[in-house]
């Protein structure tokens, strides 16, 4: 089974419960298991090295990387860069009212700008229908 690593701001994670549910539903419709790093681990401030080692392991094991960038977070950008360097397809997500992240958008293979959770789910389902894991087809 394919896995999608989903990167989201740790600090603002509670704000994304509905968006992450929409992402999970869209992924499930394509047979892809979602993996939200911040939901699986808890690290304190002194554990930055073990945290990043674990994140890198989990990204390497994934088939796809999804960056929710509606709230800018350095960690999301670092993870996206690592995923891109490892050859993972990168999907950039952002609410239409949020500030654009030029760095993550610049390395992404696909971009979804959404208006609400329903729109996010529908756009992601449509994207995944045209997606290949052995290279990204143009959309």
Image (cartoon, rainbow, N blue to C red):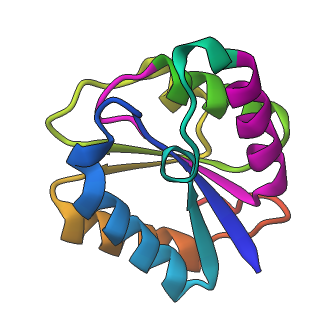
Residue 111 placement (x, y as % from top left): 45, 47
Give the residue at x 20% y 32%: 98
Image quadrant where residue 55 sits: top right
**Viewport quadrant of the C terminus:** bottom right
Residue 138 placement (x, y as % from top left): 64, 58
Image quadrant where residue 129 sits: bottom right
Q: Is 84 left, or right, of 30 in this rendering?
A: right
Whether the magenta-drawn stretch holds residue 5 is answered as: no
Q: Is 51 left, or right, of 110 in this rendering?
A: right
Give the residue at x 68% y 29%: 51
Give the residue at x 57% y 47%: 37
| Vertical position of residue 66 compared to residue 26: above or below | above
| Vertical position of residue 78 compared to residue 8: above or below | above
Residue 42 placement (x, y as % from top left): 54, 38
In depth, the one of 76 and 87 nearer the eye is 76
In depth, the one of 8 and 67 nearer the eye is 8
Whether the magenta-drawn stretch holds residue 65 is answered as: yes
| Vertical position of residue 31 compared to residue 139: above or below | below
| Vertical position of residue 69 compared to residue 22: above or below | above
Residue 89 placement (x, y as % from top left): 70, 50
- Total marks in image: 0
Q: Is residue 29 visible?
A: yes
Q: Which residues are magenta?
A: 49-73
**Viewport quadrant of the N terminus:** bottom right
Q: Is residue 84 visible?
A: no
Give the residue at x 83% y 47%: 60
In depth, the one of 63 and 52 nearer the eye is 52
């Amino acid at each position: 089974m394919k896995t999608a690593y989903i990167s989201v701001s740790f600090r603002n994670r509670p704000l994304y419960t509905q968006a992450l549910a929409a992402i999970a539903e869209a992924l499930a419709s394509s047979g892809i298991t979602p993996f939200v790093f911040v939901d699986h681990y808890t690290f304190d401030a002194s554990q930055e090295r073990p945290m990043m080692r674990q994140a890198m392991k989990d990204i390497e094991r994934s088939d796809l990387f999804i960056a929710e960038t509606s709230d800018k977070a350095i960690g999301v950008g670092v993870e996206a860069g690592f995923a891109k360097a490892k050859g993972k397809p990168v999907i950039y997500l952002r609410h239409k009212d949020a500030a654009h992240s030029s760095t993550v958008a610049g390395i992404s293979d696909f971009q979804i700008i959404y208006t609400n959770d329903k729109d996010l789910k529908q756009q992601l389902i449509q994207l995944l229908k045209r997606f290949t894991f052995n290279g990204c087809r143009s959309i």
